[in-house]
Image (spheres, rainbow, N blue to C red):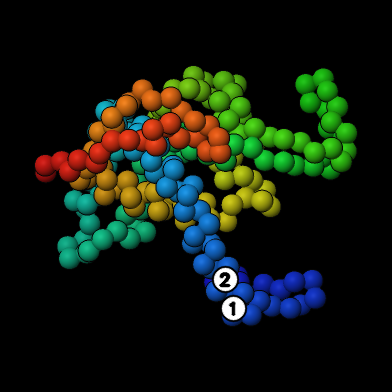
Amino acid sequence: MLDLLLECEDDNGRRLDNEEIIDTLIAYLNAGHESSGHITMWASIFLQAHPEVFKTAKEEQERIVKNMPAGQNGLTLNEYRQMEYLSKVIDETLRVVSFAFMTFREAKKDVEFKGYVIPKGWKILLWYRSLHHNPENYPQPKEFNPSRWDSYVPKPGTFLPFGGGSRLCPGNDLAKLEISIFLHHFLLKYKLERENPGCPVRYLPHPRPKDNCLGRVVEVSK
């Protein structure tokens, strides 16, 4: 990313100065803090609520640690790329929760959709939750099932946890990396015990349990 910032130019050929590059990098690292934290919370909740998913994800992380080269401290991209099941857990969490709840777009031309015509220039509101919970796209959409991603490739425009097109969130890969690293250590050493597992969900401005996931994180014996 730094290479791109150093090389990018505007229409007049002007490049970013060092201060602008630093500001952009700081924003890149900090802007997604809340969304990454929320998705990590929800993934922890789903893992606690589905013991079989927790078991499979934990066993994967244990294998990864066991196969790490002797003397290596900490994770590298090599280990991260082996987290195939955990990646499915995160994708399923992103689908079920739909953290970014809506976006606006503008019709660039007349569009016919299910018998209706959306005129060119009209603003369109896309509700991500209705997209990610559409049974035509995801059978049994309310079910948390990471295994649905085993051989499933979403149709274009049906899985948009980070937006899409030119407005795709530039921090999507970083967010998944941060979440994966946290869950790796969480699965190996801890478990979540919620005070109110059946607590209702507040959906605005972002989905979260009304008690803010009141509970405790317990260290487990090896």
Q: Quadrant of the C terminus?
A: top left
Amino acid type at image mark 1: Glu
Occupied quadrant, residue 107: top right
Please determine whether, in this image, residue 22 is positioned above or below residue 211: below
Query: In the rendering, at what x and y percent does residue 90 appear?
Result: 42, 40
| x and y, in percent, of residue 73 in the image | 22, 64
Q: Secondary structure at mark 2?
A: helix
- Asked where in the image residue 40 lies, by quadrant, the reply is top left
Answer whether residue 201 is visible to the viewer in this image: yes
The answer to whether marks 2 and 1 mark residues whose Cβ atoms lie closer than 8 Å is yes
Q: Is residue 14 above or below residue 82?
A: below
Q: Which quarter shows the N terminus?
A: bottom right
Instruction: Name the amino acid, label 2.
Output: Asp
Q: Residue at x 41, y 27 (%)?
A: 145
Whole-percent x, y for residue 134 in the image: 59, 23
Residue sitting nearer the eye, 196 or 17: 196
- Residue visible at 33% across and 50% down? 182
Which residue matches tag 1?
19
